[in-house]
Image (tube, helix red, strand yellow):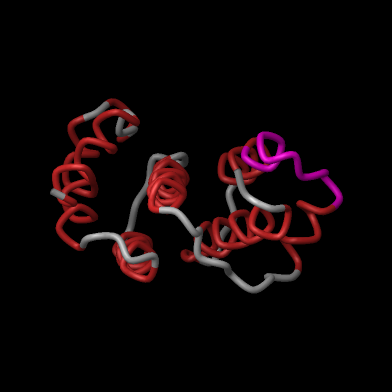
Amino acid sequence: MSTYKEKLSILSEMIAFARADHDLKDSEYNFLFGVAVILGIEKEIFDSLLKKQIKIVIPKTQADRILQFHRLVLLMNVDQEQNQIEIGKLHNIGLGMGLPPSAIEQVLTVMHDYPNKIVPPDVLINIFKAHYN
C-alpha cells in the first residue's frame, strides 16, 4: 500500500476537501477519523492534520488514485449534502490526479442512482475501466 507520508497526504487532502464549504461537520470528522484508523494513523497525528495541512502527494498507481477519488466521493456525501463548490473541487482533484474527465463526470452523475449516493466500488471500477479502454 502507501507509505506513511502518502497516508498522511491522503488524509490531508481529504481534510482540505471536507473544509471546501468552510465547515467540518461531525459526520465528516467521524468519516475522516475512520479512514485514519484504517490507514493506521494515530489520533494525535490525525488531529494535528486538522490544524496544519501537509504537502499533497498524488498516489502513484492508477488504482490508488481511483481509490482516493472514491474516498472523496464518499466523504462528500457523508453529510447528505453536496454543493457546487464541493463538486467542482472534487472534479478538479480528479483531474489533478490524471483521472479521465468523462469518468469523473459519469461517477458524479451515477452517484444519484444509489442510496445515500454511495457508488458501489465495483460500479466505480467498471466506470474507470470503460474509460481506459
State the residue lying farthest toward the right: 44
Q: Residue at x 46, y 48 (%)?
A: 64
Where, quadrant-wise, is the N terminus in this rendering?
Answer: top right
The residue drawn where x is 74% and y is 70% is 52
Does 119 lie within the magenta span? no
Q: Residue at x 55, y 56 (%)?
A: 14
Report which quarter residue 92 is drawn in: bottom left
Q: Is residue 124 left or right of residue 24?
A: left
- Name the spot of residue 11 as percent of width and height, x first: 62, 54
Magenta-tinted stretch? 35-44
- The answer to if 38 sits in the magenta stretch is yes
Please identify the dominant SS of the magenta region.
helix
Q: Residue at x 18, y 32 (%)?
A: 113
Farthest residue to the bottom: give it.
55
The residue closer to the viewer here, 124 or 133, is 133
Where does the image place residue 4, in percent across and percent down from the top left? 73, 53
Residue 31 pos. (x, y %): 58, 39
Looking at the picture, tell me which residue is in the foreground, 75 or 1.
1
Which quarter of the figure has residue 97?
bottom left
